[in-house]
């Protein structure tokens, strides 16, 4: 049955929401990346395409032009922090809103917060600090989580840790994390988020931490503008959900022993779209 349909016909039946997510992933049995496009609202894979060994801007442009030719006309395109995506998206779909995906933004920042915590833990040398090293290691993920997601144990222990580790990177990481939530979760306008970011950049409690310096540099970069698109255009999702549909596709890869070739992956994508999203039986 899959051979009876081509991709343009399948995509028309999927009724694209208008919110497009772009990402790249490395197939399990391939030596190079593939570009993948998905519907950020319906959390559907739409299409994927292998790239040549030279992965330049022109390759991505052709990928987007193919989608455009198939009548994928997004009002918003959510992408990761790869610098090529925004330039090419504006060329193919100049009217589309362009936000950076919230997940890789937070992933980038959390990398530095986690390393700051690990570095501080390593600095606690000697027998007298054994308990503190174990405590920080046990609570490291709780310290980095949103307060609303703390367990009952974390609600009990983390406030105590703030007092115990006052003036250390542990307290500063917790303070910095709350400032991030304030910027991204509690701002109602882009101007408000920018003002909060600027206020944070002028505080005096974080500059002695190299890791927090890198986080602030990131927030002060031109990329920050595209991190706030969802505040200008609420119709555009803050998250592209690419991690979700890539994980789903990897489960199919596992069953199919990794799809030996790029054409094999495309051959399996058609029946996947037909049976999983359109609920059509394979004949």
Image (cartoon, grey):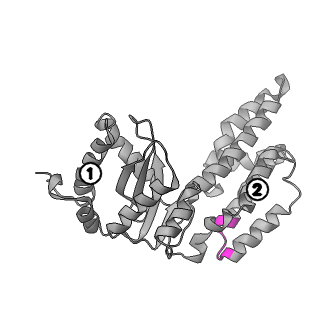
Instruction: State the residue in front, 148 or 36.
Output: 36
Task: Residue at 56% x, 64% y: name it.
Answer: 87
Q: Which residues are magenta?
A: 183-190
Task: Residue at 72% x, 61% y: name it.
Answer: 221
- Callout 1: helix, strand or loop? helix
Q: Which residue is mark 2?
A: 217
Instruction: State the residue in front, 226 or 146.
Output: 226
- Observer able to see residue 241: no
Task: Residue at 50% x, 65% y: name it.
Answer: 89
Q: Is residue 96 above or below residue 57?
A: below
Instruction: State the residue in front, 60 or 5.
Output: 60
Residue 240 lies, in percent from the top left, at 48, 60
How many callouts does the rendering have?
2
Q: Is residue 231 above or below residue 282?
A: below
Residue 173 lies, in percent from the top left, at 76, 49
Q: Which residue is mark 1?
A: 272
Mark 2 crowd level (few <14, some 14–19, many ≥20, 10 Å Cα): few
Instruction: State the residue in front, 247 or 224.
Output: 224
Counting residues from the start of the chain, the first of labels 2 and 1 encountered is 2
Residue 8 lies, in percent from the top left, at 27, 64
């Amino acid at each position: 049955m899959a051979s009876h349909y081509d991709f343009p016909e399948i995509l028309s039946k999927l009724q694209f929401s208008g919110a497009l997510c772009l990402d790249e992933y490395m197939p399990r049995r391939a030596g190079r990346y593939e570009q993948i496009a998905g519907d950020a609202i319906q959390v559907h894979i739409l299409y994927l395409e292998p790239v040549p060994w030279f992965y330049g801007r022109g390759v991505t442009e052709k990928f987007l032009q193919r989608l455009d030719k198939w009548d994928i006309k997004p009002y918003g395109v959510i992408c990761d922090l790869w610098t090529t995506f925004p330039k090419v998206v504006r060329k193919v779909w100049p009217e589309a809103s362009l936000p950076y995906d919230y997940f890789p933004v937070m992933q980038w920042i959390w990398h530095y917060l986690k390393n700051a915590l690990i570095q501080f833990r390593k600095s606690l040398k000697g027998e007298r600090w054994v308990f503190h090293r174990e405590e920080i290691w046990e609570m490291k993920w709780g310290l980095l989580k949103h307060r609303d997601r703390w367990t009952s144990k974390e609600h009990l222990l983390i406030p105590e840790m703030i007092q115990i580790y006052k003036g250390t990177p542990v307290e500063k990481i917790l303070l910095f994390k709350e400032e991030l939530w304030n910027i991204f979760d509690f701002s109602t306008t882009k101007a408000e988020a920018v003002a909060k970011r600027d206020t944070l950049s002028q505080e005096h409690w974080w500059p002695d931490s190299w890791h927090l310096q890198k986080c602030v540099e990131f927030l002060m970069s031109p990329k920050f503008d595209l991190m706030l698109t969802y505040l200008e255009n609420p119709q555009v999702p803050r998250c592209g959900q690419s991690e979700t549909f890539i994980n789903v596709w990897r489960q199919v890869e596992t069953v199919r022993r990794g799809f030996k070739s790029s054409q094999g992956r495309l051959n399996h994508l058609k029946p996947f779209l037909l049976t999983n999203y359109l609920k059509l039986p394979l004949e």
